[in-house]
Image (cartoon, rainbow, N blue to C red):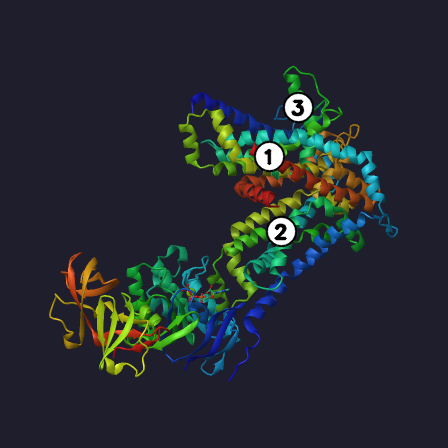
Amino acid sequence: MPSISFEKVNKKFGDVSVVEDFSLHVEDGELLVLVGGSGSGKSTILRMVAGLESVTSGTIRIDDRDITHLAPRDRDVAMVFQDYALYPHLTVRDNLSLGLRLRRMPTAEINRRVAWAADMLRIESLLERKPKQLSGGQRQRVAMGRAMVREPLVFLFDEPLSNLDASLRARMRIEIGGLQRRLNTTTVYVTHDQVEAMTLGDRIVVLANGRIQQIGHPIELYRNPINRFVAGFIGTPPMNFVEGNLHRENDRVFFVSEGLRVQLPAERLPGSVPSKAMTLGIRPEDVTLADGKPTSGGAGAARLSGRVLLVERLGGTSHIHFDVGPHRLMAAVSGEDPPAVGDTVGIEVPSERVHLFAADGNALARAE
Amino acid sequence: MRPVVRAGLYAALTLAALTFIYPFLWMASSTLKPPFEVGSLALIPHDLTFENYRIMWSRAPFGRALLNSVFVASTITASVLVLGSMTAYAMARLTFPGRRVLNAVTMGVLLVPGQLTLIPLYTLIVQLGWIDTYTALIVPYLFNATAILMLRQFFLQIPQSLIDSARMDGMGELRILFTIFWPLARPALAIVAIFTFMGSWNEVLWPLLVVRDQQLMTLPQLLTVFQLGGGAGTLGVSLAAAMVLVVPVVVAYMFLQRYFIESMAGAGVKG
Amino acid sequence: MMQRPRPERSSMRAEQRSAWSLTAPYAAFLLAFAAYPVFFALALVFMHWDLVTPPSFAGGDNVRLLVTDARFGRAVLNTFVFLAIHLPLQIVTALGLALALNRRLAFRAFWRATFFLPVVISGAVVAILWNALYATDVGLINNLLAKLGGSPIPWLTDPSIAMPAIAVMVTWKNVGFYVIIYLAGLQYIPQSCREAIELDGATAWQRFRHLTLPMLLPQTILVVTLSTINGFQLFIEPYVMTGGGPLRRTYSVVLYMYTNAFSYQKMGYAATIGVALALIIGAVVAAQRRVIGTAEAA
Ligand SMILES: Nc1ncnc2c1ncn2[C@@H]1O[C@H](COP(=O)(O)OP(=O)(O)OP(=O)(O)O)[C@@H](O)[C@H]1O
Ligand SMILES: [Mg+2]
């Protein structure tokens, strides 16, 4: 059964290196999500698997077969494009079947597969239409159908949902996830939307500047980001960062910055830690407001006080922006009765949930 | 607009329109008149006669010329579309060493006046032994820089993902061009087809240089030779010969005038 | 372990290969029918060649002959006479018709198509047709004049009238083409500009003079350039209608070039005329642009 492995893959456009030293093993049946900012090389990696972009050095294998230099048609992979890439002059049926006809598959088998995909995607009634006559979501389905009928070894998705509106995107996300689990086809899914990454991925690969930052299960990336980039990228709303220094008193270690002092769990810090130019990371959802319910923090929680600047009510939860000294932080709190702008509130940050990053961005203390 | 102005405007337009149409109508009617009646302004012939056509047809091989014209113009048009779009596709969508040069040279070709290359092209045809062949009429027109640049411009607008998708479906470049790009490029192809065909259909200087055998002459050339050689004799006969060239064009123009205007005006500006 | 970058085979190379095979015919064509003729034209300037005996080196003969050749000078002069009438006439008629068409009209497409009709007709046909229209005794135009009480005019046989007559005919043939150019330009004049100048209380003439005309300058430059180039290509009209006469007053440069090549078998001299013509066109177009440019700045 198909797995994909990348061995030290590099890609240069001219002199510009866009993917560096990319090594990764995608398990059979796995849905692996590639996330990263714009220009981080996600599409390039996907296109190298598809054979649409040449590989500068390194090897890509599907199972044990070296496909690094094969033409796209010989790789047995199928791709769903961001703009769907449906052939505008062909009907949905012809769009689905063209790839199979070009491979000279018997008509009966083509019809069977088209019917199967149309049924799974609930697009039977659209088969005789042209792409222009479809809604965005329907086009999306046809694009997936075109990949499915090929029954390829590997699915590749390049930001397939980014042209859809928010609610449709959420629906299609669930559908893609369900479909992939049912078909159990090895899949690489590119997105810059970290919610999509968290909800869909068996594992997530975070990329920056063509390099892998971290690979792991979504929750692991959320709990233990390996560096400041991953910490900022994974999780919504994004993590708060505060610049400051470490301060040791006896056995205890504090993170100190103007107007703010947080005790850190000393036992989880490495023995020799630099103390200057550190960054403290606090997830907004880890922050609790002290004047609400009884705090969960107890002894291990740092108490701060801040002035509320802005309240965004999202319904069930609210985002509270506030100043602590010169620092601007955000808390995501539940409840329908958030504090008002201008209020001074008590804030608790459980010290075992904070993240600490050294000057080079690497994580020192991690939540458990 | 005030009603007076409006009336004046329509009167002026009608007069202008008559200036452009009336000569052609007069020409058509003159071919159906006996010689003594030709000078009259009236469009309806007094004595309807097809004599002019009979004389014209019997004195020079106009039927053959019509076939020659159709053959030459169609071949050139097919080539400009097929070979031209292959070239334009590569220039627009494939990366290869030499692409920039090809682009630059193609634009440069448009700046070279035809008069500069006319004589050396003629001597080339003579040396190749192509005088009095269809080859001489066709080969120098197999490619057209204006057409290539127009098609290239159009091909640049087609999304890359369609090409990617087609490649993953297993198509080669030619197949992508003819099964994906062509259906999408129909308007551009139509525009190129019209100005190429019309350019060839109306061309007269080049055939005058390289063809002397009446059997190989295209319509405009035979018409010119017929007129100058005095073969026509009367005005009615020479206008009848001109009708053979005009009627197909006018019929096509009536149905496709929007495309004709877009095509010939566009090509003129670019070429 | 170091892994040496492997040369890129596969898709990239395949793409290059297909690109080269797709463009090879065109490249060959360019060499044979574009590059070679340009260079050979320059070479022919220094050759005597009658296409029968082998070419011989001519040195400066052809160039010397050209600068002293009264017939060539006459042909160039004729072209300037042609342009002096044709250019203003072409601009005024094209602009006038375009302005009329740019109003809200019934049957707009019809009017446009009518004006464009002569553009799609072969120059040979137009020449033959106008030969008939201009005919002194049975011609349509003189018949019309007679109806209006005028006396017949020898359009193509009077040396001072023949070239202007041809200029009028060429204007008639091409005006539809330039109407389209001006119409496209008129579309680009923003509605807000029109409204602004109207609020400023401009009369129709002032609007035309201070808004429309300046905004159409790029189109006017195009019209001047294209009809100048076209004027230097004058061939079939004098060839069919006057044979270059009367008194060589309608002889054109291309007609002279054609005659040298086709009738006199003087390839070197014909090519020299072609090269000179290309240079003259380049110089005239450049000069026109400069004049129009300074006129605009003033
Ligand atoms: N054909 C190309 N030639 C040169 N540079 C390229 C080419 N394609 C991509 N790049 C560059 O490679 C880098 C990675 O591009 P890539 O498309 O893989 O990014 P991405 O992560 O998919 O970004 P996005 O989220 O915006 O789609 C970018 O800096 C881009 O400019
Ligand atoms: Mg991308």
- The kind of residue on which mark 3 rests is Ile
Mark 3 or mark 1: whose residue is earlier in sequence: 3
Circle 2 chain:
B
Badge 3 is on which residue?
Answer: C141
x and y, in percent, of residue C52 in the image: 87, 50
x and y, in percent, of residue A176 in the image: 33, 69
- Mark 1, Cα crowd under 10 Å, few <14 / some 14-19 / many 20+, is few
Residue B51 in sight: no
- Mark 2, Cα crowd under 10 Å, few <14 / some 14-19 / many 20+, is some
Circle 1 chain:
C
- The kind of residue on which mark 2 rests is Met
Q: Which mark is residue B110?
A: none
**On the image, which quarter does residue C86 sit in?**
top right
Horizontal side, residue A365 vs residue C230: left or right: left
Q: Residue at x 79, y 30 (%)?
A: C248
Task: Specify whether disc 3 shares its chain with disc 1.
Answer: yes
Answer above or below: position of B27 versus B123: above
x and y, in percent, of residue A298 in the image: 14, 75
Query: SS of the residue at dot 3?
Result: helix
Q: Residue at x 76, y 49 (%)?
A: C41
Of badges 2 and 3, the one in the foreground is 2
Circle 3 chain:
C
| Residues at marks 1 and 2, CA–CA distance in whole angstroms | 28 Å
| Residues at marks 2 and 3, CA–CA distance in whole angstroms | 44 Å
Task: Specify whether disc 1 shares its chain with disc 2.
Answer: no
**On the image, which quarter does residue A247 sit in?**
bottom left
| The furthest residue to the right | C53
x and y, in percent, of residue B67 in the image: 68, 47
Q: Which mark is residue B107?
A: 2
Badge 1 is on which residue?
Answer: C294
- The kind of residue on which mark 1 rests is Thr
Q: Residue at x 43, y 61 (%)?
A: A86
